[in-house]
Each structure stands twice: as structure tokens, then as C-alpha cells.
Image (cartoon, rainbow, N blue to C red):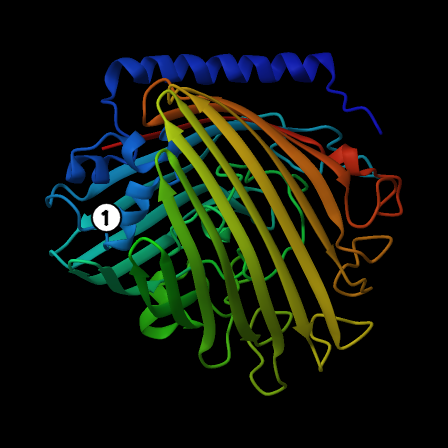
Amino acid sequence: MAKTIISIPVFNGLIRCGLLAAFVALCLFQAMPAHALPIFARQTGQSCVACHAGGQFPELTPYGRMFKLNGYTLGERTIPLAVMGTVDATKTRHNNDANGNPISPKDGNLTWDAASIFLAGKITDKIGAFAQYTYTNYDHQNGDGRWIGKWASDNTDVRYVERIIGEASDFILGVTLHNNPTVQDVFNTAPAWSYPYLSSSTSAVGSPQFTPLIEGALAQQVVGIGGYLYWNKLIYAEVTAYSTADGIWSFLSHGSKAGDLAHPQTYLKGYNPYWRLALTREWGPHNIMLGTFGLLADVYPNDPNAFPIFTQGVTRYRDIGMDAQYQYLLDPHTITAQARYTHENISDPNNFVLGDSQSANLKSMLLKMSYIYQAKYGVSLAFFNVTGSTDSVAYASSANFSPATQGWIPEIFWIPVQNIRVGLQYTHFTKYLGSRSNYDGSGRNASDNDTLFVYLWAAYW
């Protein structure tokens, strides 16, 4: 096994970044009340530990899941605004390609990464919403290499809920309108809310390059309308249909549109079904979930100028997943464990995506465990593994024409108050694009992409 090495100057620079983040956190500690995302804390009168496991946003507790399933309507109406932001630094082990050019231009720099405005909470006794609007400071580079920032719609979820409680039954029946498959889900195994909860947005190699469609490719590209039920805190079931977030729904997209090379719109054919089924149980400080989910999506191709081609057919994606989650919540200890496996079949009869055949598969696995003490001091460890069919067109950046990528993510973090988190995360790759060594044919090894990420996350109102 290759050793992971961080040069002394780089390490010292990152230590300085970490100390700066800690100093900012301590300053904020003196100025900010002890809540996480402040809207819901004000509305319910609860601290963030009630909704988030060990205070770690966005990981939900049983109470947090019930709050979301009830349409964000528990408690009293209050000021529906909050803000959130991140400051971070990323360092890649080897940040130069075979020609000596930097792979990630912002590598090693302390950056203000992004900021979000939230409009969320109770609208009526049966209607509630979660709407996020985000400014990304390093959204993309223009033709001159200058970074361009961008304000755009982010995760959005609007709900109407009826709750029927009888002597022997408790039914929650809801309707959800949202813009990201699984953003409506209440478990942190769902791709939209799964680990890593924070990661580098400026690294070009710090995460797997290829994952199934449901794991983020349609985020802020679609509008979904679905119905769900939750019975006796035992069975959760949902069916949703997705279509393109254009026309009257374009406000739900990430500013994407036809002909925009920086933000091309993904176009779906018709209505594309998603389903979800989960079994849950709570006993004492323990709770567990076993579930499955699936998405069937027909995607039109875009031409080289990012305009959709509606006349030549579609690429069909069939994503089926299984997941599980366990939590132990008893002060001062919080333990969570999550697992997800997704299998994707790709049918591409016109070779819009594939080149060597008309069908392929892509498989993704994520395992994660974390421990938090006193809702302040946390550690986590995750393992990820992506495998799939080889293809010379879909995975042309791999010398093996393979998407296979594998690695580990250890992380330590500190929560000085409940709406601030300071963390250090390391991603170590044991395989990248099909190989441990020389995966690109130019001598680059998987471990060259190892990424150190130091961050400060804070929310305020």
C-alpha cells in the first residue's frame, strides 16, 4: 500500500488555515446564540441537537425526521429567514498534471466558498417549506480563466401534510414539490443528504468522477411532485414523478438553461418515476431503518452548444438502491452508521453516452460511521467504492476506460456552539478510474488525488 505523504510546507500552511478557522469560530462563539439552522430552532423552541444527531447538520434524529415529515409545520410561525456560509481550504497531494499545469487552480488557498439564504418553516398548519438560495463564489471560470460567482436556486422542498391520529394508528399523509431527487427524504443514506456533508467545491479530483444518475446529476435540474405516507413510525412509502425544471418551473433550476455551456439544462422525456420504501423502528436510545429506492429516467442528449436534441431518442437510466441506517442517541454519546448501495443500468441505443456498446452498468457503495461526544467533538470514517462496465467514450479520461474509484474519508470536527462547525477531512484514494497506479496513462496514481479539506461552517439569522 502506497504511503500518504503531505509535505511539511503544505502541512504548515493548512495548520495556519485551521488555526484561522478556529479563531473565527471562537469569535463567533461570543456573538451567536446556540442554534443550528435558526429558522426551525426558533419555530420549535428546540436546540439543534433535538433535530440533528449530535448537533451535526444535516444528520436528522427521529424528532428531526418527524418535523420534516410533518411538512416543517411543528411549532409556531416565526421569522422565516436564515443564512449559512462556509470558509475552507483544500490541498491536493499532487496538484500538477503531466505537463506541470495545476489541476485545481485554487488549491492550497483559504477561500470563502459559498453562502446560502433560507426561506423556510411553517406557512399554515398544513403547509410548510424549505427553500435555499445559494451564492457559489467559485462557480466556474470564464474564457480568460477568471472565476465567476453565481446566485442560484438550491435545494427546495414544499409540502402539504395531513396527520391522522387514532387510538391505534398514526398516519402522516403528504404531498411534496421539490427540485432534487431524494432531497425530500428524511434519512441520511439518501444521496441528497448523505456523507460527506461538506466537501471541497474547488477540487477537480477530490471525489469520484462518475456516480449513478440519482446521486446528484439531476439536482436542481428537475421538478418533482410526489405523495408519501408514514404509518405508526414503522413504514414509509413514497412515489414521485420528475420532469424538466423549465418553463414555469425554471425558478427551481440552478440557473441552468439551453445553450449555457457553464450551466447546461438536463432535459428529461415526459414524467420519470421514483419510488421509496423504508421500514423503521425506535426503541430506547436506538433507531434503525432498512430501505430501498429506485429512479427510472429518460434523458435527452445535448449538442456541443448545450442545446437539447429532441429528435434522436434518449438514454435510459434505471437506478435501484438499498440502504440502512442505525443511530444511538443518549447524551453525551451519539453514534450513527449508514450504508447505501446503488446499481444503475444504462441503455443507450444511439450511443449518446456510451461508445463500446449500447448498454452498461454503474454501481456505487457508501459506508459511514461517526461518533460525537457532548454534541461538540466528533469523528467519522467513510468508505466509498464505484465500479462499472468499461467504455472508451464514457470514461475516456481513464487509461483503462473504467469508472472504478475507491477510497476512505476520515474526518474530525468540533462544534463549539450548535450552529458552527470546524472540521478537517481527508480523502484517500486506493483506486481511481480503474487503477491504483498510472490510471490516466501519463503516470498519475490514485493517491496523487488525496485531498485534505479544512472548513468552517456557520449559520446565523
Please say if 172 is above or below 138.
below
Q: Secondary structure at mark 1?
A: strand
Q: Is residue 267 left or right of residue 145?
A: left
Q: Quadrant of residue 276?
A: bottom left
Residue visible at 60% across and 50% down?
143
Residue visible at 21% across and 62% down?
161
Residue visible at 33% across and 13% down?
27
Q: Quadrant of the C terminus?
A: top left
Does residue 136 appear anywhere in the picture? yes
| Residue occupied by mark 1 | 120
Q: Quadrant of the N terminus?
A: top right
Q: Is residue 361 left or right of residue 288?
A: right
Q: Is residue 182 left or right of residue 452?
A: left
Residue most toward the bottom?
311
Instruction: From the viewer's side, name the closer residue of 90 and 111.
Output: 90
Instruction: From the viewer's side, name the closer residue of 184 and 141.
Output: 184
Residue most toward the front?
168
